[in-house]
Amino acid sequence: MRPHSLLPALSVAVFILLSVVACAQPGPGPARVEPLLENAASATGPGEETGIRVRTLLEWLQEPWGMDFLPDGRLLLTEKPGTLKVVTPETWRTTDVSGVPAVADEGQGGLMDVLVHPDFERNHWVYLSYAVAVEGGFTTRVSRARLRGTALEDFEVLFTARPAYAERRHFGSRLLLDRGLLYITVGDRGNREKAQSLLTHNGKVLRLTEDGRIPDDNPFVGRDDALPEIYSYGHRNPQGMARRPGTREIWVTEHGPQGGDEINIIKPGANYGWPVITYGEEYGGGAIGEGVHKDGMEQPLIYYVPSLGTGGIAFYDLNTYPGWNASLLVSGLRLARINRLELDASGKPGKETRLLGNLGMRVRDIQVGPDGLVYALADRSRLIRLEPR
């Protein structure tokens, strides 16, 4: 593994494209949320220069996947092959954390998300999601341990998705803790029909207590035909999740197939349609499912055609970047950029700004730091920071 070092102050002008998000054709039913369709970006130029620069803080990372900040300003960062690093701000030196569980670095699986408990200063809990090899193949697991210094101790396995599959794709897996409840995303694992089954964890958003128990008010508790961990279902491969500030709304992004990436507001017990309805198509062309609408299935708040390749998301409600207050930041793996969606007071998306598209970096995750600045993981390479001039 190549050593990590602080690069010289590298500032690259960031360009943006402004596009108005257009509404799709309305579907049947009064309760349907209007989806918003992104216009294609490939035929247009880089746009106008903004007053924002990109600084590379770390280089030569090994497929960075997830990150979260500690209360003292240090950053925890995962690398897909199985390394958890603690990053010291200002010097940007990294130290490997010991006690990380063995992971299955297979296909799209490996060490994925890291989540710092909101009350870390008291309990020292850190949560990890990762792929493991078990009987029957590979699956997604979530554990927690106490971070003391640079070592994980008191390790606990909280959840293992079932069943396992030989396929090495669509593991999910983003984590969120909100008011003592742990939300976990799990992809369909390449077995799309399982996203509609309430007897598997595949293609689901799951909800546990922070110590791994089943909340009494989960929507399928007490049913013989459903797993009680399930909070919502009908998802393909959700890899972004965040709570909108000032609300209880949990927003999730997920990969579509060829087109049809979605942003959804998660409702308990709701069915988000995959693979019965989708705005995407088969790779290489061809319809999937029954169309784009069906009674009893939710419509996305937003969908993307072509696919953005959605990764992590973050809400921004500060004033460090002029005009950014009340925004959703969406990282893109396929179109290699960050999309900033302006939100009105009710959370409805409006104008979209496309950032970093001229740099050609696949962006896996995005976080707002304690300094009010935006940090992002550029897949297979870098930790970057967006800075106002």
Image (cartoon, grey):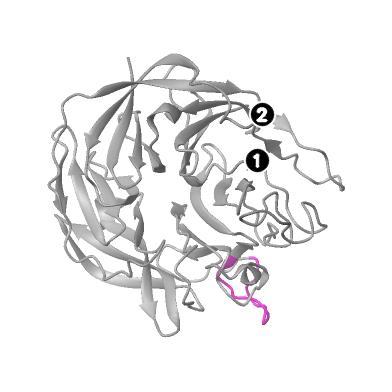
Mark 2 and 1 residues: CB-CB less than 8 Å, in contact? yes
Q: Amino acid at mark 2?
A: Val
C-alpha span from label 2 to label 1? 9 Å
* Residue corresponding to mark 1: 302
Task: Estimate the x, y position of residue 388 in percent, counting from the top left.
Answer: 35, 18
What is the tally of numbered marks visible in this picture?
2
Q: Main secondary structure of the magenta part?
A: loop
Task: Estimate the x, y position of residue 21 in percent, counting from the top left.
Answer: 66, 29
Q: Nearer the viewer, residue 314 or 377?
A: 377
Q: Amino acid at mark 1?
A: Ile
Rendered position, 306 above or below 162: above
Helix, strand or loop at disc 2?
loop
Q: Nearer the viewer, residue 382 or 214?
A: 382
Crowd around label 2: few <14 · some 14–19 · many ≥20 (10 Å)? some
Rendered position, 379 above or below 324: below
- Residue drawn at the location 67% of the way across and 42% of the way down: 301
- Residue drawn at the location 67% of the way across and 51% of the way down: 280
Quarter of the image with the C terminus in it: top left
Q: Report whether 310 appears left or right of 218.
A: left
Residue 224 shown in magenta: yes
Q: Report whether 331 appears left or right of 121.
A: right
Q: Nearer the viewer, residue 208 or 53?
A: 53
* Residue corresponding to mark 2: 21
- The mark that comes first in sequence, 2 or 1, is 2
Helix, strand or loop at disc 1?
strand
Q: Report whether 3 appears left or right of 280.
A: left
Q: Which mark is residue 115?
A: none
Task: Estimate the x, y position of residue 14 in percent, counting from the top left.
Answer: 39, 22
Q: Which contiguous range is marked in magenta? A: 219-230
- Residue drawn at the location 48% of the way across and 72% of the way down: 167
Residue 224 visible in this rendered orientation of the protein: yes
Task: Estimate the x, y position of residue 305 in percent, counting from the top left.
Answer: 64, 41
